[in-house]
Amino acid sequence: MSEIDGESSPDLQQFIDREHLLLASYATHSSDTQGRVHLESEHLYRAPYARDRDRILHSSAFRRLSGKMQVFTGEMGIYHRTRLTHTFEVASVARTLARALRLNEDLTEALALMHDIGHPPYGHCGEDALDACLAAAGGFSHNQFALVVVQELEKRYLNFDGLNLSHETLAGQDVRANKEAAAVGRSPSLEVQIVDLADSIAYDAHDVDDALQLGLLTIAELKDLSIIQRAILTTGEPIDVLPKQQIRVELVRALIDLQVSDLLHQSSDRLMPHGGKSCDEVCSLGVRLEHSTSIASEREELEQFLFETVYRHKRLIPVREAAADRLQVLFDTLSQDPLRLPLRFRNRAEQSSPEVATGQYLAGMTDQFCDQQYRQLTGPSSGPLADW
Ligand code: MG
């Protein structure tokens, strides 16, 4: 049920008026909101999606992103991104895009801060391992688990579980529902699309940066890629003569800038004929924001290169295998003996199944916490493990 059925409250009206002046018609406006599951009065000076953003930022799952690896492990140094710093980079790119396209920045930021909140420990290999463990129970997806985190697992309010986020913020994270809608020609809100695009711009650029810094790649290896040649050209500098560290930062900056500029240019053209239409109308028409054909194919070439060269690098393989083994042992032991789960997850095991509750317990862990619980489980103690 909406909290703004009928007349808008005076507090909400001020945001509606402000957004009417600042945002494009096809942005998601606060006046479009279908509200929250649990009725709450409007905030005096924060619009609904700004409250969502703050709720996500203050959640414990958000803070735990600092202890989750993105691609590289802490054993490889401290330069590389964690899920938390990646998330801030995504939010930064997404806000820039949203502001330039006159979309809703509050909603964009809320979606960006939430987008990886459901990631399990140990990066992509952690997700693959949990997905395999949970195969018989429907598999594991960090996108869907993010919804469990923000709707059930976070305990911040006396009267309800979860963060009670606005309908549009939750809908943006529901990748499964968005795929089903796409099959019948409906696109997600432009804010959702922007965050998705900002995510891939950010990780392509920072994975290049991290891999160069960690010595998993060389500039010489990268130089054959079209998008790297394009990035070098846009710096306007003879970057070959610069010190190696400087080449890296110039290159990464140019890589982000050229992709954001391309996307903005394409999006402005794409949205031009839709001036005056509402968010719902644009979604019904299935309007999609995307890169130009040339940048899209160059990005694909870069991603393929990163996949083969970096993500499968021999220095990463033993780390990934050991991490996957730890998760497998934890999963097998706890799902067969749920009395060793912390109380909260023992209760969830009774409501759903030991497999699902164990998967959720493991998915919420940081890398280090998972290591500790693994040692605890395989050590002499037979008591329950700790909650996070
Ligand atoms: Mg991401």
Image: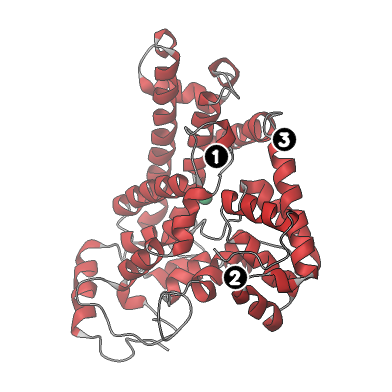
Q: Which residue is mark 3?
A: 317
Q: Earlier in the sequence, mark 1 or mark 2?
A: 2
Residue at image x 39%, y 56%? Answer: 271
The residue wearing badge 1 is 296
Labels 3 and 1: the sequence-earlier one: 1
Q: Quadrant of the C terminus?
A: bottom right
Tell me the SS state at disc 3.
helix
Give the residue displayed 36% in from the left and 55% down from the top: 272
* Residue neighbourhood size for the residue with mark 1, other residues' Cα within 10 Å, grouped as few (<14), some (14–19), many (≥20): some
Q: Give x and y (percent) for residue 248.
A: 45, 22
Q: Secondary structure at mark 1?
A: helix
The residue labelled by disc 2 is: 177
Q: CA distance from mark 1 to mark 2?
A: 25 Å
What amino acid is found at the position of numbered circle 3 in the picture?
Ile
Residue 163's place in the image compared with 10, above or below, is above
- Give the mark toward the camera: 3 or 1: 3
Amino acid at pointer 2: Ala
Residue 126 position within the rendered picture, expressed as x and y whole percent measured from the top left = 67, 51
The answer to whether residue 259 is left or right of residue 293 is left
* Residue occupying image coordinates x 52% and y 45%: 200
- What is the C-alpha distance between the residues marked 3 and 2? 34 Å
Q: Amino acid at mark 1?
A: Ala
